[in-house]
Amino acid sequence: MSASALTPVVRLAPAKINLTLSVVGRRPDGFHDLHSVFVPLAFGDRLSLAPAGGTSDRLHVAGGDAGPLTDNLVLRAIAAARAAVGQGPGRPPTPPLAARLEKRIPIAAGLGGGSSDAAAALDGALEAWGTDLDPERKRQVAASLGSDVPFFLAGAPALIEGRGERVTVLQGLRAGTHPPGVLLVTPDIRVSTPEVFALYVASGARGDGAIRTTSMHLADELRRGLTGRDLVARTAVLASANDLLPIAAALVPAIVPLRRALARLLGRPIALSGSGPTLWTLYASEGEAQAAAEVVRDAVGSGHVPTPGAAAPTVTATTIPIASSAPAGAGEASKATDEAGQAAPDHLPTRPIAIQSRREP
Ligand code: C5P
């Protein structure tokens, strides 16, 4: 083990929003093929990992509810990383790890918190042991942990296809432009993604062609790079570009009056992230999003906005960070050419990172 393994490894595990979410169709394995543009946010959990004594990995969760520890994806990710490294002569030692997770992302909220923690744990465990996996193998392990985990391994704006295993890193927002503000409103209701997809199937829903077109168009624009201002100008079209919105609204009807009240209060279109229940909208700056967050908190306090669930919604203002250097994981992808046949810059792969879709038993 290298000397660096003796110092704790710290990883920030960002939340995400889906700027678009098109359900392309159902797969033979029961999952759904998606076409979805994901962006990481400048807001998330913090995970630290350090080799520890004892015989098993440990997890301490601080701040916020992360659900039952046994179900926690951090411990599953460390175990999957250990299994992938393997044991025996010639293999690096993979001693038990003590993990500490500072939880800020609301769970079962459509923000990808558990998946982001899993990607951070997979990558961080390998570093704590002073080793690494072949990038393709690492992406396979990520996909085995959950559909959204490969995206978080890449850690950059991306087009997500297949079940989540095909990650095409996009340029995203152009360097030098102003990062847009994001307002997140998460009602105190957990939404189960499997239940949303089950209702999607039961209702006989079909992906909306207009949403698919919006998603393809946005992916093309972000592949070339958009300014923050241009992205904010697209908020209205993005706010209706989620095939799971009517399904989540049917499952949790309280989302509908909340979304309507926020749209009226803020004078802006309101979108749903993933399978919900987090609602989001975009602003020209983080400062404007913070001001809007205050308006929402005041309206919640005075009863002008319905507050489904047992507690007040979690209201967060953040930004979509602008990559100043190569996105994490992008260097692992093969160099490709863009549609015009021009060589893409090294930091900007345009070919999907295809990995085998497989779930461990
Ligand atoms: O992979 P993950 O555990 O995050 O998926 C949760 C559930 O969501 C799956 O069991 C499946 O029912 C549904 N799902 C799906 N298609 C996807 C992703 C998730 O049907 N692309």
Image (cartoon, rainbow, N blue to C red):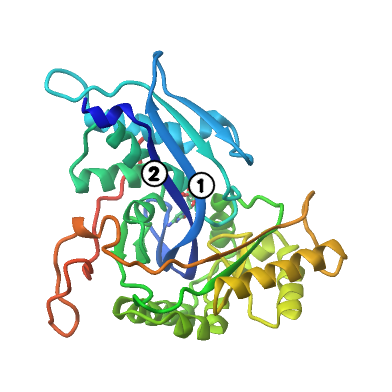
**Circle 2/circle 1 CB separation < 8 Å:** yes
Q: Where residue 108 appears, x then y in whole percent?
A: 59, 49
Measured along the vertical axis of the image, is residue 111 above or below residue 10?
Answer: below
Q: Earlier in the sequence, mark 2 or mark 1?
A: 1
Judged from the image, the secondary structure of the residue bearing numbered disc 1 is strand
Q: Could you tell me the amino acid type at mark 1?
A: Asp
Judge from the rendering whether residue 6 lies leftward or rightward of residue 13; answer left or right. left
Where residue 76 sits, quadrant-wise, is top left
Query: Which of 126/208 is in front?
Result: 126
Q: Where residue 205 appears, x then y in whole percent?
A: 55, 69
Measured along the vertical axis of the image, is residue 298 above or below residue 233?
Answer: above
Where residue 256 sits, quadrant-wise, is bottom right
Q: Residue furthest right?
A: 302
Q: Where residue 314 appears, x then y in whole percent?
A: 69, 56
Residue at figure coordinates x 28%, y 64% from the top left = 325
- Tell me, yes or no, if residue 240 can be seen here: no
Residue identifier under label 2: 120
Q: Which mark is residue 45?
A: 1
